[in-house]
Amino acid sequence: MRNVFLWAVLLGALTGCMTVGPEYQRPQFENPPRWRFEEKQATDMANTAWWEQFNDPVLNALVVEGLAQNKDVRIATARVEEYFGRYFSTRGDRYPFADAGASAYRQRASEEGGALASGANNPYSVYEVSLGVSWEIDFWGKYRRAAEAARAELLATEEARQTVVLTLVSAIASTYIDLRSLDKQLAITVQTAASRKETLDLFTLRFSRGVTSEVDLSQAESQYQDAMARIPDIERAIGRTENALSILLGRNPGPISRGLDIEALTLPQVPAGVPSDILERRPDIRQAEQTLVSANARIGVARSLYFPNISLTAAFGSVSTDLSDLFSGASKTWNYGVPISVPLFTAGRIGGEVKSAEAFRQQALYSYQQAVQNAFRETEDALVDRTQSSRRLEALALQRNALRNYARLSRMRYEGGYTSYLEVLDAERSLFDVEVAYTNAQDTLFRSIVDIYKSMGGGWVAVATEQVSVQPAKKAGFIP
């Protein structure tokens, strides 16, 4: 018994000495030294609640509500809980397993062929209690690699939850900005329609008195109906945008509260950062890396199948036909052993497992590389959008001022009889189109800032995640 115990201690000590499979190393990248369209006035704002820089209390409240009620966030949180369970289940395979049992039954044995001892009771009762312990020695690191893979999968799930939070906050801000842009476009269109209605009424009166031609009257009516025809499209877009934002907030589709007009919103500062920061800032990249860590560990699990399985088993109990003698010395039973099994012929099953694990690791590696490259692209796209949208907005502002002057002068020339009404129509039509284009450009500029924060990631994701109402029971960072 002592020798078996010593062998058990020795095998347990050797368990931590051999681990098959490759050790994980982070892939190396050639990171761009700087962004192509770097913002000169960038500030270190990546770790703050950037949506508060819009200075719109309604938007701030919507973000808080979305983080508390959004169903995607709750699904992601429940998935983290699921992977906690998977991790602890996998981790438990590394340790001994003990169980206890008890049974009581009555049976009758055959009396033919001398199977029953002379004078023995038949039928008779049997009472049994037992305690068993088994432990598969993780000599080759199979269970350590499996626990390593499960831990990485848990961490990847937590990063996926933060990706959901990142996407949610960005989507709420972008959708709210779209809604305020549509509200502004609707106000411009309604105001234009009212102005054209006044012109139409005036021309109708003039035509009835023979002062204005029917051509001018028809042109005025055409312009009025054109503005009226645009209103339903904008109102439909507003309704659909409100419904989309309601779902992001975890509500049923319905109306959305409004705060500042789009022109009153404050443009947030561009966050500072270099391309190499992306690897640590973005949760989707960290998720892809943890998936790669898990795939790398699974190779070790597969390779360990080539080696023998070594276990320790022991059982102690008592069996008696008389309940009063169940715990007497004569009723005791015990056994212990060291079962060993070695795969001799598997028809390629183990080789297939290893090949599959290695191929999956390659997929995970390429997915990780692709995630990094997509992050670089998305950030570059957002930065160039910010630069060019700002330039376009400045040009549209100048064009809008010029067209306002053109519309005023053409109206004066028409009233003075120096030009036809066509010139007035051209000026007002161009002004209306530029007013709408200017609002769209404001929308694009604000959204580009949102996209920059989304693509760069940063500490603000953790700030937002802390505001989620439903948190996992345990923090993934405190995994034993």
Image: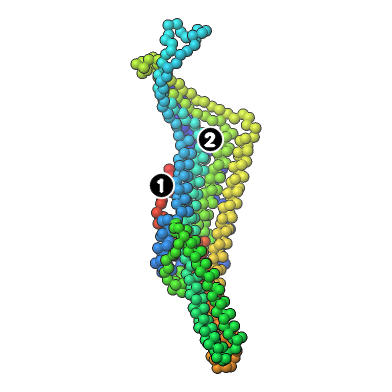
Q: What residue type is labelled 1?
A: Lys
Residue name at image x 47 percent, y 58 percent: 247
Please tell me whether mark 1 sits on a helix, a strand or a loop: loop
Residue nearest the observer in this picture, 132 or 95:
132
User: Is 144 placed above or below 168 here?
Assistant: above
Q: Position of residue 419 (x, y in %)?
A: 59, 91
Q: Mark 1 points at which residue?
A: 474
Residue name at image x 47 percent, y 12 percent: 109
Tell me which corner region of the image, top left, top right, bottom left or bottom right, holds residue 200: bottom right
Residue name at image x 55 percent, y 42 percent: 298
Q: Residues within 10 Å of mark 2 (few under 14, many from 20)?
A: many
One can see residue 26 in this view:
yes
Most extreme residue toward the right, as rendered?
347
Q: Mark 2 points at which residue?
A: 140
User: Is 147 placed above or below 451 here?
Assistant: above
Q: Position of residue 207 (x, y in %)?
A: 56, 88
Residue name at image x 45 percent, y 44 percent: 84
Q: Where is residue 64 in the image (x, y as percent from the top left)?
A: 41, 60
Q: What residue type is labelled 2?
A: Trp
Q: Quarter holding the N terminus?
A: top left
Please tell me whether mark 2 sits on a helix, a strand or a loop: loop
User: Is 124 placed above or below 311 here?
Assistant: above
Q: Quarter holding the C terminus?
A: top left
Q: How crowded is mark 1: few (under 14 residues within 10 Å), some or many (20 or more)?
A: few
Most extreme residue toward the left, as rendered?
324
In space, the residues marked 1 and 2 are separated at their CA atoms by 30 Å
Mark 1 vs 2, N-terminal side: 2
One can see residue 438 in this view:
no
Which is more foreground, mark 1 or mark 2? 1
Q: Where is residue 55 in the image (x, y as percent from the top left)?
A: 41, 69
Most extreme residue toward the front, as rendered?
208
